[in-house]
Structure formats: C-alpha cells, structure tokens
Image (cartoon, rainbow, N blue to C red):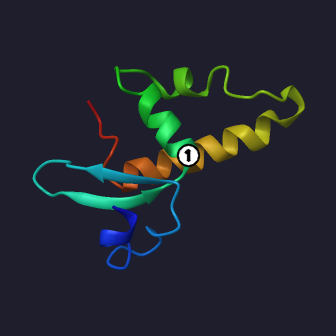
C-alpha cells in the first residue's frame, strides 16, 4: 500500500502506519505514527482522553514528554478524521 499510493499522499511512504478514516462521507488517507496507531487501537471502544493518557508513561520522570507526545498524536488523529465527537 505504501508503494501504491505513497507518492500521492505526502509523508505516506515514510509513515509507520497508514490511517484510512471515513468521517461522514469522505475517505481520508493519512500517514500515522506508531503512537497514533496505538492510541486509535486503545480508543476502539468509547473512552475519555484521560483514559488514553492513564498508564502510558513507562518512565515516571518523563511523564510530561509522554503526555505531550500523546496529545500531539491525539490532535493528529482528530485532524485526520479518525476521532470525532460521539
């Protein structure tokens, strides 16, 4: 899939994961990081953002960096149409 449509979607050829979302009627294809894929898998069932953040930091001293990365990944998922308000 990377080779097939990678040249048509910026960043897709280098992405860890391909995100295909269908918010409403449009089909959107976006590059995604491994963290984005993990968060999307965790959000398969309805959860709050707090639940997605809970227990995500393996290094207690690095919680702020971890939370920042997760928030950036969540924003990217929302912008890509993968997460929408219920």
Compared across the picture, whether 38 is left or right of 79 comes to: right
Of residue 21 and residue 70, the one placed in the foreground of this image is: 21
Q: Residues within 10 Å of mark 1 (few under 14, many from 20)?
A: few
The C terminus lies in quadrant: top left
Q: Position of residue 39 (x, y in %)?
A: 50, 35
The answer to whether residue 38 is above or below residue 51 is below
**Is 66 displayed left or right of 85 in the figure?**
right
Drawn side of residue 37 relative to residue 19, left or right: right
In the image, 58 versus 49, the foreground residue is: 58
Residue shown at 35% from the left, 21% from the top: 46
Residue drawn at point x = 42 percent, y = 75 percent? 10
Q: Nearer the viewer, residue 79 or 38?
A: 38
Q: Which residue reaches farthest right?
A: 61
At a point 18% along the width and 57% down the height, the residue shown is 27
User: How many numbered tags mark residues here?
Assistant: 1
Above or below 40: residue 77: below
Tell me: residue 9, above or below residue 16. below
Residue 14 picture location, percent across and down: 53, 67
Which residue matches tag 1?
Answer: 34
Instruction: Kindly give the residue lying farthest to the left in the view shown.
Output: 25
- Residue 31 picture quarter: bottom left
Q: Quadrant location of residue 35?
A: top right
Residue at position x 37%, y 61% from top?
A: 30
Residue 42 located left or right of residue 82: right
> Quick one: SS at disc 1?
helix
Q: Position of residue 26 (x, y in %)?
A: 15, 58
Q: Dividing the image into 4 quarters, which one contains the N terminus?
A: bottom left
């Amino acid at each position: 899939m990377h080779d097939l449509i990678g040249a048509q979607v910026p960043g897709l050829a280098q992405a860890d994961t391909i995100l295909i979302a269908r918010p409403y009627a449009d089909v959107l294809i976006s590059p995604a990081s491994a963290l984005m894929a993990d968060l999307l898998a965790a959000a398969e069932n309805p959860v709050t953002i707090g639940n997605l953040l809970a227990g995500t930091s393996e290094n207690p001293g690095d919680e702020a960096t971890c939370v920042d990365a997760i928030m950036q990944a969540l924003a990217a998922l929302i912008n890509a149409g993968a997460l929408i308000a219920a």
